[in-house]
Amino acid sequence: MTSILQCPVCRLTLQRTTAGYQCAAKHNFDAARQGYVNLVLAHKKHSKEPGDDPEMIQSRRRFLNLGYYDQVSDRLNETVCAALPAMGCSSGSSVLDAGCGEGFYLQRLKSALAYGREAHSPILFHGVDVSKFAVRQATHRDRGMDWFVASINDLPFIDSSLDIVLNIFSPANIAEFARILKPSGSLVFVSPGPRHLYGLREVIYPVTREHEEPTILKKAEELFALSSVDRITYQLELNSNQVIMDLLAMTPYFWNINRETKVKVAALDHLALDVDVEIRVFNKKVVKL
């Protein structure tokens, strides 16, 4: 099968080798023993270890494994299942989770497509995250997918090569997503709804305001057309201090609040909160010359 990966050094196509990947200019990228490949160039790192650290990854893994976000994952899977036939995807179709974290959503999507009521043509699954700790954990979920350490600002895929890009609670790069998607491709963007994590936020902030619409909507207008918006809402009851702290650690609030507020959250052993998530599907616009 033709490779869709590109070398981060020279932009030539990367071909799989017994050790990892190599381009025609002989730039080599060896696979780690866990199976992933690091495609972040040293001089492009903004820190020694960019992305989420091991403790944050373990917190996210523990929380997600308890099933609290399974409803979000299930609705995402339904959205992708509905999009694939409409796109005319055939054998060799490719899906990328851009900002895949420890692989929870992509692994469940692969399972849903493999064991759903309707059979789908073979699909290649790729996960990319700038945190090597996250990608290392993702390989534990499914080594049958291609996992890469890479930045969403410099994705290692050739132009117009992917059918679907997922972006789930992660920073987005609209121009890069448009570059790597096929003309018929779709971006599936998952973001907090207005009341997401109400309950936790009421503990953290003196005044709690609803989330505004994501800035991606304005940024996407030139390159994408909004196809659909779906909203999932339900309530959670967390009855463990460990679970509450794991949830906090997988949110931006963990870094934004002061020590006093962290102590306040750490004292909780029960928390009721809202899950409010929006899934938007964007279709790539055809550029008229």
Image (tube, grey):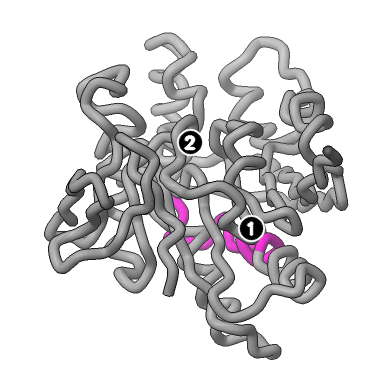
Circle 2 crowding by C-alpha within 10 Å: few under 14, some 14–19, many from 20: many
Q: Amino acid at mark 2?
A: Ile
* Residue 278 quadrant: top right
Q: Is residue 72 magenta?
A: yes
Circle 1 — which element?
Answer: strand
The one nearer the camera, 170 or 151, is 151
Q: Which residues are magenta?
A: 63-76
Q: Please give the count of numbered marks on the rendered protein.
A: 2
**SS class, disc 2:** loop
The relative height of residue 217 versus residue 126 in the rendered view (above or below) is: above
Asked if residue 46 is among those painted magenta in the image, a careful observer would answer no
Residue 146 to residue 170: above or below: below
Q: Nearer the viewer, residue 37 or 2?
A: 2
Relative horizontal placement of residue 14, taking residue 126 as reference (left or right): left
What residue is shown with label 1?
A: 164
The location of residue 32, given as percent across then percent down, is 15, 54
Name the residue located 52 percent from the left edge and 62 percent from the top edge: 67
Q: Nearer the viewer, residue 262 or 126?
A: 126
At a point 72% along the width and 45% down the height, the residue shown is: 277
- Residue drawn 46% across and 67% down? 107
Q: Is residue 31 visible?
A: yes
107 relative to 184 in the view: left or right:
left
Residue 152, label in figure: 2
Residue type indicated by callout 1: Ile
Image spot of residue 100 (x, y percent)? 46, 49
In-front residue for pair 229/222: 222
Quarter that holds the N terminus: bottom left
Sequence order check, earlier mark of 2 and 1 = 2
